[in-house]
DNA sequence: GTGAAAGCGCTAACAA
DNA sequence: TTGTTAGCGCTTTCAC
């Protein structure tokens, strides 16, 4: 018993006007007679008329929709700790602007190209928010060059792309500095996937801090991991087996930090007395742990919101589309 | 330099056929000559043609899109621990079926009605997945009665609605039983918002277990809270002030459990020796805490996936739309 | 086997 | 001030 949908034509017919007039009336166009307008509006309200956006989209050649595209692989998945915050920031702005929010995930990274293309060509969305891709990903360039409105949530590796990024180098510098100022000398750094720029940036910040504080950088203290909680745990266990000596850990994200702390506890080491640990992201759960997790705050929600605002500007033509438009968020801790 | 879009007409013109034939060729219709077909397909591929889905939607009167609607309020927000898992389950099924995923949030619960209506009438989506609403919410009924394909992620309070729910009573029963079997007698229950059915169900399971184990239910041991980590912390502190005696806590979710554990630790109580704590949701972080959090597993991802599959069945007409279609997920721990 | 034409719901240019 | 017409891109009869 699916009710047929009430359309503009229905309204027009009942009101005894043409659909053009009805359309104008609903758009509150000054040309249409005030009485007719009221009449039309009254009928529309009574029948709970809402314009079919598909029809409107086809006509206007825009979808009033923004898509977030990202691969749903373990390390960039939904379960990524701050992913939900990002969604929240994006969603807020979109809803406030009466835009729709399309979520597009791909099972693997290689399918990403297809997903981009699809969004691009099916015209289901007017713009795309891109999740940071591996630096090796060449698809990004294609999208950017297509002229389609895009905002990239990371460091732009193309002059013309709109970006919103965080100061990962600076954040990592602060984290490391914090440990150095507490007198730590042998600071382990647990990295994420090395093919992400974020990872390289955090490593860079770590190195810079060491250098500024005249502590020799020791490659053996950098453990390549993958942003997963379990890896933090394993890293500590591996170091135990390899008899690595260290008095602090700077983890590439909070997940690894939490895993590391757990491992340290299981080994009977005291945190932070024996080993101090600093994370990155400042997820809420860190504050409730014992010991509390020291972490670098990531303004993820604001990143999402700002990225969306900038994208909408481009879509609405409020802003010149192709300009170096990078914006770096400061990171506090 | 926004490139104009390549349309079916373009393909047809270049191929030297009518757009009707081009359309049939692309749909692999047997009527069209194999040679023409190949020719058309070749050109389409070369020009990277993808049908405009808006046009197609308008014609077909369907959007190939499913919307998830929920209020973005603190306790049902994105940051809800298992929210991301739900998204993942939904997303997986939708992408596999070439459906689009629309995320629709509302700033307040009262705006939800508007959001539903909008989705319903703008025809942007063919079906809706409904986040569990407060039992007091009357909007749900309107949607259900509208005949629009809907699946509700909770206990149906309408005979005709398709639901996917979890066995919250049973889960809470198990959690409480676990504590009782460990010899605990004075078990505190931290509840979530009382106007959600989940909350009432968990309370019910708690009561049933007590009864079955011949432990007197004591209303003063039920503390009304709101599923937020901080509240778990506060609850313990309040009980301390009020000199409530207890030897176990069954928290309505993991967040409150984690908060409670932290408070207990701050008060110098040992977990689980002095006070045993059981949570609900089994979020990943619980396993990395020290002490590890005992929790009731929620198959949230599967709930999302199943809900989506059932909804697609309804949309595709694979399944009779209006039938008692409840499905209860078993909960393990 | 192919093309012409109609129409999904909407809006905008143009006429009246 | 209102109506007529056309067309966004697509698919689907119905002729040929």
Image: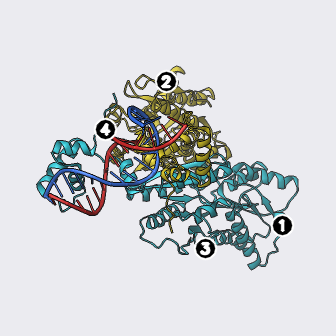
Chain colours: A yellow, B cyan, C blue, D red
Locate the C terminus of chain A and report the quarter of the image it occupies: top right
Q: Are marks 3 and 1 on the same chain?
A: yes
Quick check: can you spot residue B332?
no
Q: Which mark is residue A208?
A: 2
Q: CA distance from mark 3 to mark 2?
A: 64 Å
Residue B29 in percent (x, y) is at 21, 60
Tell me if label 1 and label 4 are in contact, CB under 8 Å. no
Indicate which disc, 1 or 4, sits on the residue closer to the N terminus.
Answer: 4
Q: CA distance from mark 2 to mark 1?
A: 58 Å
Comparing labels 1 and 4, the label whose residue is closer to the camera: 4
Q: Which mark is residue B219?
A: 1
Q: Is C8 positioned to the left or the right of B134 in the image?
A: left
Q: Residue furthest right?
A: B242
Q: Is A196 positioned to the left or the right of B324 in the image?
A: left
In this rendered view, identify the residue nearer to me: B286 or A298.
A298
Residue at image mark 3: B159
Residue at image mark 4: B5
* Crowd tier of the residue under label 3, counting other residues whose Cα lies within 10 Å: few below 14, some 14–19, many 20 or above: few
Indicate which disc, 3 or 1, sits on the residue closer to the N terminus.
Answer: 3
């Amino acid at each position: 018993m699916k009710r047929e949908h009430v359309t503009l034509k229905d309204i027009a017919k009942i009101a005894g006007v043409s659909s053009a007039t009805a359309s104008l009336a609903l758009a509150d166009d000054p040309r249409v007679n005030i009485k007719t307008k009221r009449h039309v509006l009254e009928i529309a309200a009574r029948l709970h008329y809402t314009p079919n956006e598909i029809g409107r989209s086809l006509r206007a050649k825009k979808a009033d929709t923004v898509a977030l595209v990202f691969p749903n692989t373990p390390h960039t998945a939904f379960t990524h700790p701050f992913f939900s915050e990002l969604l929240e920031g994006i969603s807020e702005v979109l809803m406030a602007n009466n835009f729709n929010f399309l979520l597009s995930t791909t099972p693997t990274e290689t399918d990403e190209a297809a997903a981009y293309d699809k969004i691009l060509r099916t015209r289901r969305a007017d713009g795309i928010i891109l999740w940071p891709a591996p630096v090796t990903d060449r698809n990004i360039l294609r999208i950017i060059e297509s002229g389609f409105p895009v905002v990239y949530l990371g460091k732009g590796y193309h002059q013309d792309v709109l970006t919103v990024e965080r100061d990962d180098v600076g954040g990592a510098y602060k984290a490391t500095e914090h440990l150095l100022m507490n007198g730590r000398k042998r600071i382990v750094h647990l990295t994420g996937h090395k093919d992400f720029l974020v990872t390289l940036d955090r490593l860079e910040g770590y190195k810079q801090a060491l250098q500024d504080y005249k502590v020799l950088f020791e490659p053996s203290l950098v453990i390549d991991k993958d942003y997963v909680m379990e890896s933090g745990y394993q890293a500590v266990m591996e170091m135990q087996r390899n008899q690595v000596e260290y008095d602090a850990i700077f983890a590439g994200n909070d997940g690894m930090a939490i895993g590391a702390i757990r491992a340290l506890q299981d080994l009977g080491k005291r945190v932070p007395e024996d080993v101090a640990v600093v994370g990155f992201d400042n997820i809420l759960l860190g504050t409730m742990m014992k010991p509390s997790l020291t972490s670098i705050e990531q303004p993820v929600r604001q990143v999402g919101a700002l990225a969306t605002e900038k994208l909408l500007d481009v879509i609405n033509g409020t802003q010149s589309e192709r300009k170096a438009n990078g914006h770096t968020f400061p990171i506090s801790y």
